[in-house]
Image (cartoon, rainbow, N blue to C red):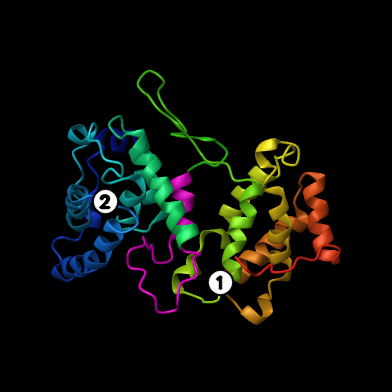
Amino acid sequence: MTEKTFVAFPEIDIQYWQLSDPVWVKQRQSAWLSIEPMLLGTMNKSKKAITIIKRYFLKGIMPDFEKLKKWESDYRHLDLFSFLWLHPSWDEQVLTELRHAYVHYRLVTQEDVEIGLSEFISSAQSRAGADYEPNEDVSFIANTNGHNELLFKVLMGDLSIPVIPEYREKTRWRWQITKREEGIQDLLFKTKWLCNKHRHELAEDYLFQYDLPMQFWYAGSSNQQDFFTRKKFEKKVPYLDKALYRIHHFDDKKEGDSARSRFVKLARKILDEGEFVAEFKQRWLDVKSGEIIIEGVWES
């Protein structure tokens, strides 16, 4: 990103808003009718926030961060996720530069970033993986229309650096966010959707079918040498076998090409080839050899 772009924020390049094109404007207005229920639904945005976000979505008008900095709202306004998700461009470089400018802007609050990250992960993982009926109305859930993989890459930034913002001027920065580290304990939660009785289109963009999010899980899990000895994980250990059993025994051939099949194939490869604490590795080998058999494994 150029210094000019960094200094100019929150002013942004509005060339992506084709306001002189009546067809584009009409399409954008029509799209808003689907966006608003998502913001009011699981994202819990207030009417004030909706007004701010609508101006951004339709015309590229940025919030007045100075006035909103001390606004006490649990869900804030144009959070980091909303800022990128509702931008007209899906170009990775464009969104990466915008993300960098957003998290480094001195009037953006910690909550603006944390709420955005939390909402994205919730929508792309737990909500996407729920067992919806095929035609069930899920208009209240943030839907990125197939862009979860890209948004994960952009939102999380440089995964080798554990905090956001990754680069900052110490003299003027007051907060930083530690990126939530994935671990062995998260595996059971990631396999619950393998038990779903229905296949909803929302699940086809489930986050952990993609390589980068799964590598993020692996990076944290492979470093957990104390997982089986720490008391905080004691209650989670019995559920690991169930998770591993689901991954190994999921019938991906019967399933065909789907997000769930892609997830289990990727998970198997990581479990086969990755380095983990010995006890975890052995449990995976025992599941594969048939030494571990679990009843009722497909009950979520």
Left or right of residue 103, residue 231 in this image:
right
Residue 258 in view of the camera: yes
In the image: residue 117, left or right of residue 247: left
Q: Main secondary structure of the magenta part?
A: loop
Is label 2 in contact with label 1 (beta carbons under 8 Å)?
A: no
Residue 122: image location, x then y, percent = 45, 54
Residue at screen point 35% across, 73% down: 137
- Say which label, 2 or 1, has the lower sequence index: 2
Per the rendering, the mark at residue 196 is 1
**Where is residue 217 drawn, in percent x and y?**
62, 49
288 or 60, which is in the foreground? 288
* Range of magenta residues: 128-156
Residue 88, visible in the rendered structure: no
- Numbered mark located on residue 45 in the image: 2
Q: Position of residue 41 (x, y in %)?
A: 31, 59
Comparing 235 with 86, the one in front is 235
